[in-house]
Image: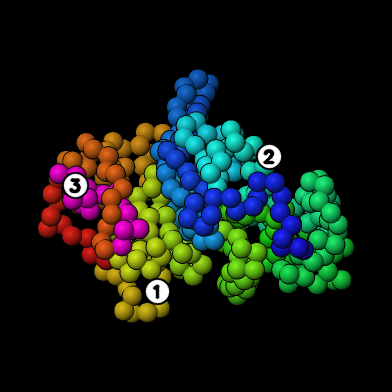
Amino acid sequence: MSKTEVLPHQADRGGPRQPLILAQNLKKHFPVRSGLLNRQTATVHAVDGVSFEVRKGETLGIVGESGCGKSTTARLLIGLTELDDGSVIFDGDILGSDISLKEMRRSVQMVFQDSYASLNPRLTIADSIAFGPKVQGLSDPKDRARDLMARVGLDPNRFAHRYPHELSGGQRQRVNIARALAMSPRLVILDEAVSALDKSVEAQVLNLLTELRKEFGLTYVFISHDLNVVRYISDRVLVMYLGEVVEVGPVEAIYAKQAHPYTVSLFAAMPSMDPDNRTEEPPLAGDPPNPIDPPSGCRFHTRCRFAEHVCRDKPPTLATFGENPDHLAACHLRDPSSGHSLAGKEVAA
Ligand code: SF4
């Protein structure tokens, strides 16, 4: 595939300093019915005022417990789920205004966890990869598919005419990666894309993703619950809790010293073979609160052992932590400008 062949809206227009994605105050609330005869309606606060940027050429890891809003955030970025509020700006263009959903979905591709469900069982592997380019009217879709198969480690002579059920999970995920690349995207969102693979296959696919990012000049958003995998592949990490961002920063800064008590607890549960890396922090206890009725103030206060009155009354905002201006955390304990001193309750990390 020619790496110079780009689609409209896919050239780098704003230069390297302009974020590829600027997500501003994203909100998504889902109505749910409950009670007798399903007459009561309630609202799940899936994503509640999430703002962040994805820089060109980086891998941004998004972590958090299941139900924290990681996948909904990814779907909002690409327009697969409609925003209730907020905006997504792609390389300077506002989604839905300057850039259409159709163009956005071409520039941003997703790879999901379930490699089988992502493929049409009636299409051969080559036809699956060629489908998108063919619909877009790109030249030589079949040749493009065969080139990409070779690039993701699948011999086109052996695999082009096979069907998804004839492949292993790792091979199917390689097909899904090739399908994403066939659209010449600028951003690929990997939503738990390696979580279902065996550890040895997972390592091979992670290495492949790293090579492809360099080769095709891609940017990744990598969603995972596996902190070791996120550390391996990411440049920066964003931590979500109950629909909000609680910490964001460079991977080396966050893995060296977590700022937010939630992140500290999350990392305490991370398995480590290195005794020097083990933490004395207790792992997170209990389940997250109901997203239908999230706690007031800091949403983590019901599980935080450092919580004080201020935490119940006032939501913390993201503030710089430590010496790296890129490392931010939303915690009264960490924000000297909050006016509330929780001094003496230092979080061990
Ligand atoms: Fe804990 Fe308060 Fe910080 Fe929230 S703001 S994480 S409750 S110390």
Few, some or many residues within 10 Å of mark 3 (<14, 14–19, 20+): few
Query: Residue at the spot x=46%, y=35% of the render?
Result: 86
Q: Closest to the observer: 301 or 239?
A: 239
Can residue 250 be seen from the camera position used here? yes
User: In the picture shown, does residue 25 fall above or below 262?
Assistant: above
Point out which mark residue 132 bears.
none
Residue receiving disc 3: 337
Residue 73 as seen in the image, left or right of residue 264: right
**Which stretch did the figure color magenta?**
324-339
Judged from the image, the secondary structure of the residue bearing numbered disc 2 is: helix
Residue receiving disc 2: 102
Amino acid type of the residue tagged 1 in the rendering = Ser
Amino acid type of the residue tagged 2 in the rendering = Lys
Q: Closer to us: mark 1 or mark 3?
A: 3
Can residue 172 be seen from the camera position used here? no
Mark closer to the chain start, 2 or 1: 2
Residue receiving disc 1: 272
Q: Closest to the observer: 242 or 77?
A: 77
Q: Closest to the observer: 172 or 338?
A: 338
Judged from the image, the secondary structure of the residue bearing numbered disc 1 is: loop
Amino acid type of the residue tagged 3 in the rendering = Ser
Residue 155 as seen in the image, left or right of residue 22: right
Instruction: Please say if the residues under marks 2 and 1 sit with CB atoms less than 8 Å apart.
Output: no
The CA span between labels 1 and 3 is 35 Å
